[in-house]
């Protein structure tokens, strides 16, 4: 991913650290470049799910580099290339209209990307309470002026970014913590949510977003399993 895109998406935080719960710095679990790339992808997903991309972000996406050569031809590479291509043939006004039609409504939006809805059938249910408990133990809390609940898919991706890359007042967390958070709060429901995004009337750019999220999450799940197996050896 090229530097301008990284700079655009890296600090789109909807979470804040709780300084008194911050731990001591932990050694990196993988190469810094790989971990930063993961954090940047989570930041991009959070940005696209929480707000429609503006013209500058679409321009940066359209100019983004391909994934490394060793990833060429795999599902994530293809999904990334399709997202980049979609950014070249759309404009910010069209994407904003699509975003508003799908995720914002006076009544019930076409898609509500909240864990509680998918796991319990209603918003603000037990999954959200459990998430808030886990966030507190990690030293994280919702920003006071945030317009979204913590179990929004974009907010969960922002949390993953913080667990990987850290932030002021909080250190990166080990892979075991990242895996536990991903498996508990994202893995059980994301596929159904992304399928709803793809099938929503008028979905165009966000169909490509959903494809990219799914491919990235599948790579993450596989990587977590491989890391656990490696540590167990």
Image (cartoon, rainbow, N blue to C red):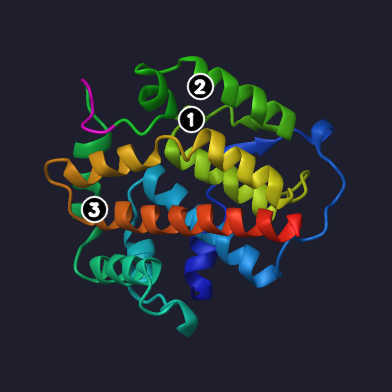
Q: Upstream in the sequence, badge 2 or badge 1?
A: 2
Q: How far apart are marks 1 and 3 (CA)?
A: 21 Å
Of badges 2 and 1, nearer the viewer stands: 2
Left or right of residue 55: residue 115: right
**Residue visible at 83% across and 53% down?**
26
Marker disc for residue 151: 1
Q: Do the residues labelled 2 and 1 touch (CB within 8 Å)?
A: yes
Q: Upstream in the sequence, badge 3 or badge 2?
A: 2
Q: Name the residue under label 2.
A: 127
The stretch in magenta equals 107-111
Left or right of residue 220: residue 153: left
Q: Is residue 66 above or below residue 127?
A: below
In the rendered image, residue 136, in percent from the top left (x then y), is placed at 70, 27
Q: Mark 3 points at which residue?
A: 207
**Residue visible at 73% across and 29% down?**
137
Tell me if residue 12 is in the magenta stretch: no
Q: How far apart are marks 3 and 2 (CA)?
A: 26 Å
Q: Upstream in the sequence, badge 1 or badge 3?
A: 1
Callout 3: helix, strand or loop?
helix
């Amino acid at each position: 991913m090229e530097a301008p895109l990284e700079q655009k998406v890296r600090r789109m935080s909807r979470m804040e650290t709780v300084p008194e719960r911050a731990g001591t710095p932990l050694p990196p679990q993988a190469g810094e470049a790989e971990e930063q790339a993961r954090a940047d992808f989570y930041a991009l997903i959070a940005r696209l799910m929480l707000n429609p991309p503006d013209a500058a972000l679409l321009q940066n996406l359209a100019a983004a580099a391909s994934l490394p050569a060793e990833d060429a031809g795999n599902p994530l590479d293809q999904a990334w290339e399709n997202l980049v291509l979609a950014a070249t043939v759309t404009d910010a006004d069209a994407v904003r209209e699509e975003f508003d039609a799908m995720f914002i409504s006076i009544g019930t939006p076409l898609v509500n990307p909240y864990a509680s809805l998918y796991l319990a059938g209603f918003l603000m249910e037990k999954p959200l309470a459990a998430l808030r408990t886990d966030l507190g133990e990690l030293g994280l809390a919702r920003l006071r002026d945030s317009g979204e609940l913590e179990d929004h898919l974009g907010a969960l991706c922002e949390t993953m970014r913080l667990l990987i890359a850290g932030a002021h007042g909080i250190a990166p967390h080990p892979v075991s913590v990242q895996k536990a958070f991903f498996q508990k709060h994202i893995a059980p429901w994301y596929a159904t949510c992304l399928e709803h995004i793809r099938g929503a009337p008028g979905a165009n750019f966000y169909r490509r977003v959903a494809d990219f999220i799914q491919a990235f999450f599948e790579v993450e799940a596989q990587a977590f399993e491989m890391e656990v197996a490696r540590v167990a050896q």
